Each structure stands twice: as structure tokens, then as C-alpha cells.
Image (cartoon, rainbow, N blue to C red):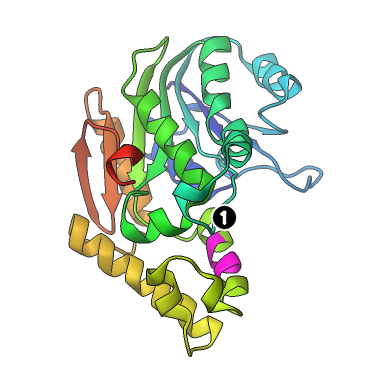
Amino acid sequence: MGKFLVIGGTGVMGTAAIQAVRKVYGKDAKIIANWYGKEIPGFKIDDVDHTIFGDITDQKCIDAITAIDSDKFDFMFYATALGDVGTPICDATQEQIDRSNNLSYLPILNLEEKLDIDAIIAYSTFYVIRHQLATYGAMGHSKEAIEKWTVEPGKSRHSCIRAGLFESTSSRGIKLLLRKAAKHPENLKDPLLRGYFENVSSKEGIKKFEEGIFQEEKEAYGDARTKAENLYEAHLELFQSKNPVFVNVCGKKIWHTEEPLLLKDYF
């Protein structure tokens, strides 16, 4: 049994959370999942009991959730994010950071306050590796905010799954922006990035860039090339752990840590 709320139920992380809930808690677990985008009438998220369409920053969406169930949720998984990427984290403007936080971070605080949730699970990445510092933009600041929140006491218990590079909206956005920038590699400030795109096609540059990330992740954390099944396994590990703080997953490697990654230590 148990009751679960998944914000961002159509994404890679949200899907992994839903699959892990069903594996651990079975068919009797009650799952409410939210999604937002181009509305598709009658759309239902696979393997959930109730699908809620709407912008989680809108009180109407929260009202739709509580109309289904206003009692305590055992877990909430906050698996949605949106922010400017494709530029160095240190170059993000306050306006970009605020815009990113509006969906990627602040709704977590709002939902924690307004709903009765035993444990909230948020998501982060290894944004302090060299390649991410150069490309993660405003999202890097939102992820740091999430990591700081994770170690703070709150109304709910806080945990975070921190993952290596996997195919996602953010990773696709970074590649799209780099592909555009590659038309004029001399405008890329970071020499690491510029080196990937000089005298090669944008397609080749993107491939070299991704390989660079995988190499850096493997050197730093012991594995790379994180897949959907690895994210699923990380959720199982979270359920099996007592009061986890950060559950890290990079490739097939999964391990626990307790400290946030702080940008001030890197620039």
C-alpha cells in the first residue's frame, strides 16, 4: 500500500519513480502523477491511478491533486525542471536563475508547505564537473538550491537522487544550443567547449562533447553512461535505505553521500 505523488510523471525520472513504486509497493499502492506540456485529451500516464494535467506552479493544479486525495502522502517525487542551459553556470543572470527556480525548485517548497507529505524526493546531477560547469547555465543554480534544501530540516523528510548524464530535456537542450553555437566556435568562451567544435561538423562536435562528459564522469565517479534502468535501480536503493540523503547514480554505480555540491567551491 502507500500513497505516492509524482510531479513530472512522463519524464525519465518520473517514469523510473513510478516503476520503482510498483515494484516495491505493488499494485495496491495509490499513485497520483502530474504532467504538463501540450495537452492531449484523455491522456493517461502508464501504471498510475490518477493522471493530473497542469502547471504545478498554478494553485488550480494543486487543487486538482487534493481533490483526489488530501490525506498524507508517503512520498512525493519532484521530477520536473525547466531553465536556461547551454552556457556556463557562472554566466547565468539573476533573471535566468529566478526563471529556472520558478519551476525547478520553488514548487518543492510550496508543495511541502501545503501538502502533508512524509518524504520528498528531488533530483540533481553532477553539475560541478568541468563539462557541466561550462554548459548547465541557470539550471546549475537551481540544482544547487535543491541540494542545499536536501540537507535542511523541514516539515517533510528530504532526499535527493543525483544522477550522471542521461538523455533528458536538459541534455537535449544543451546539445541544441551547442549545435547552434558551433556555427561560430570562436564565440564559445570556454576553451574546453571550443576545442570540441573547431574544424569539425557540429554533429561531430556534439559527439566529442558527450564523450568528454562520459570520460570525465568515469574518471571522477567510477562509471558513466547512465541509462533509464540505472535510474530505476537508484530508486529501489532509495526505498531500501534508512533516511538516505543523496543517492548517487552514475552508470551502473550507485552510492550514498550526505553533503551538497556547492558552486562556491568551483568558481
Tell me where the magenta segment starts and ends, as one range.
174-178
Q: Kindly identify which residue carries mark 1.
A: 169
- Check residue 65 for magenta coloring: no
Seen at 53% across and 82% down, the residue is: 203
Horizontal side of 50 relative to 203 (left or right) equals: right
Name the spot of residue 136 as percent of width and height, x first: 47, 53
Name the spot of residue 48 as percent of width and height, x first: 57, 36
Horizontal side of 223 relative to 59 (left or right) equals: left
Q: Nearer the viewer, residue 163 or 199?
A: 199
Please tell me whether residue 259 is drawn above or below residue 46 in the rendered image. Answer: above
Q: Secondary structure at mark 1?
A: helix
Horizontal side of 216 relative to 198 (left or right) equals: left
| Residue 173 appearing in the image | yes
Seen at 37% across and 61% down, the residue is: 131
Q: Nearer the viewer, residue 29 or 188?
A: 188
Residue 258 figure quarter: top left
